[in-house]
Amino acid sequence: MHNSAPKTLGESIKSRIEHLIKDKFKIHEQVPNPEFPKNLDYGELFTDIAFKLAPLLKMPPNKIAQEISTELQDFGAEVKGGFINFKIPVSKSLEFLGIEKLDLLSGKKILCEYVSANPTGPLHIGHGRIAAVGDSISRILKFCGADVVREFYINDAGEQIEKIGLAILGKSQEYKGEYTESVKRKIQEMNLSDSESIGFAASRIILEDIKKTLARFGLEFDSWVSEKEISSKYSKKAMELMEKYLYYQEGALFLRTTMFGDDKDRVVIKSDGKPTYFGNDCAYHLFKVERNFDELVQVWGADHHGYINRIQAVLNIFGFKNKFVVKLVQMVNLLKDGKPFQMSKREGTFVSLDELIDEVGADAVRFIYLTRTADSHLDFDIDLAKKQSLENPVYYVQYAHARTSSLFREAKNKNLYDGYENWKQENWKKQNSRLKTSERERKLIALSSVLYDIISVSAKMYEPSTITTFLMSLAREFHSYYQKERILVDDIDTRFSRLLTCEIVQKAIRTGLDLLGVRAPDKM
């Protein structure tokens, strides 16, 4: 069941079309990968290449599509209104199943930095969405062959650390609440007196809580980088590299980021001699550049939009010529009974990620966070997330996986499984296969083979929701199949063909869920 050349089905169609138009029409044209349709009645992939070629060839799109599709019959090509749709035959789909890894990004070293929350309090639900997006992007890039380092930048220097120190000393109104009180009790045993060392000690206690929450949420980081440590090591060198772009104004030191497209120059050292948050960030980004990554990916809250240009400016000054990607993640609104909802006022202002996980479970939180594109606002319906029914999207997809597992258990219990593995080996990709498939099975096997194209698109767009949407489509098709077909019939070839279909769907769902960081349960 393994494919040695990890080329996807869509890529194979694309390269076939490129050769075709070169031979047939004598033109060299970049052909986009076929896309996944919104309406699965037309097929599992489609291409609009005929519309792109029409002005070049001075021919109607439908005629071009007809000419191309005659050469793509082994991919099940059909023309409708100038579009070429692909209803992939089983024999073709089977060639593209069982890929363990794609080679889209092999040899690339990528740094993914995300969450990086201030260690001044628990993670809130907004951090949670950033965590889900960042972790899933890391998993997807890794699946596509990249060497990925997942990094958390600890903001343990500067004003907010001093402020939490003052709050614990009772000299500030910020960061008050039950949580800060519990941190204060732990610090009283340490005999510290000044706000800065108290603040730093508090940040370390809070960081441990953040790590526990992230572990509950299924996140692991390869690297934890301390702002305090990095600024002491890299600030001097960063300042030297930026020297010719620095100037003083009213006692503060500015960096000419406007030379690189920023809307105003930015302060790196304040008039009191202390670095700004951005000043320390310059040192951190020098540390990033010096590690020679091919790509720097950061996942930030949408409120950091204005921060992109100044970081891009600094990277330019440091001579970073590789890819710099910022993924912005929008806010989360909680809903209960269809109305906006604050779960508890423990911190006075926000709902913690731990509370949401306690309420609906980590799988539901992660999956629902990834149901919409990262740059769109998300309404998180708590009632829906708790439902053990097919209305709940995460339950819907996980239940499809559990159903396939229970089918195999039932087959084994009823002695209807004996000989299946041998039968599978004998009939997988064979010319005179005894595989018996209806249109429903063809469609499920085809969809499962298209998963790798979906993953590839998701990696290029840094967008996990592409996979979530696909899994919901695959689960919908599977549930409908399961309800209409008896799988464990008497005829051996029919039974084993149906079991094989279920096994292929199961593997696709498990692969997809794993990339979202969601479990694929065998029982529900």
Image: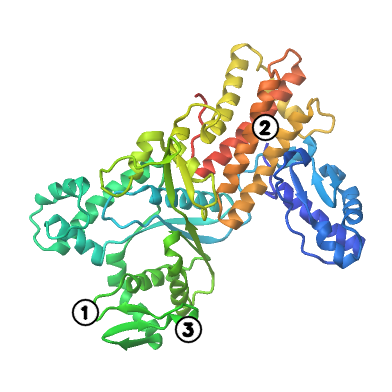
Q: Can the viewer see residue 57 in this picture?
A: yes
Q: Position of residue 65 (x, y in %)?
A: 87, 53
**Alpha-carbon distance for marks 2 and 3?**
54 Å
Q: Amino acid at mark 2?
A: Glu
**Alpha-carbon distance for marks 3 and 1?**
26 Å
Q: Position of residue 30 (x, y in %)?
A: 77, 64
Along the viewing direction, whichever of 337 and 485 lies nearer the viewer: 337
**Alpha-carbon distance for marks 2 and 1?**
64 Å
In the drawing, what numbered circle is on residue 272?
1
Q: Is residue 255 left or right of residue 273?
A: right
Secondary element under disc 3, as helix, strand or loop, is helix
Name which residue lies at 65% across and 39% down: 98
Q: Up-down: is 21 above or below 409?
A: below
Residue 149 occupies which quadrant of the picture? bottom left
Q: Can the viewer see residue 198 in this picture?
A: no
Query: For the residue carrying disc 2, how many other residues have a C-alpha within 10 Å: few (<14), some (14-19), or many (20+)?
Result: some
Residue 44 occupies which quadrant of the picture? top right
Secondary element under disc 2, as helix, strand or loop, is helix
Q: Up-down: is 193 above or below 309?
A: above
Instruction: Give the mark, 2 or 1, whose residue is nearer the N terminus.
Output: 1
Residue marked by disc 3? 259
Q: Is residue 27 left or right of residue 5?
A: right
Name which residue lies at 84% across and 62% down: 53
Residue marked by disc 2? 477
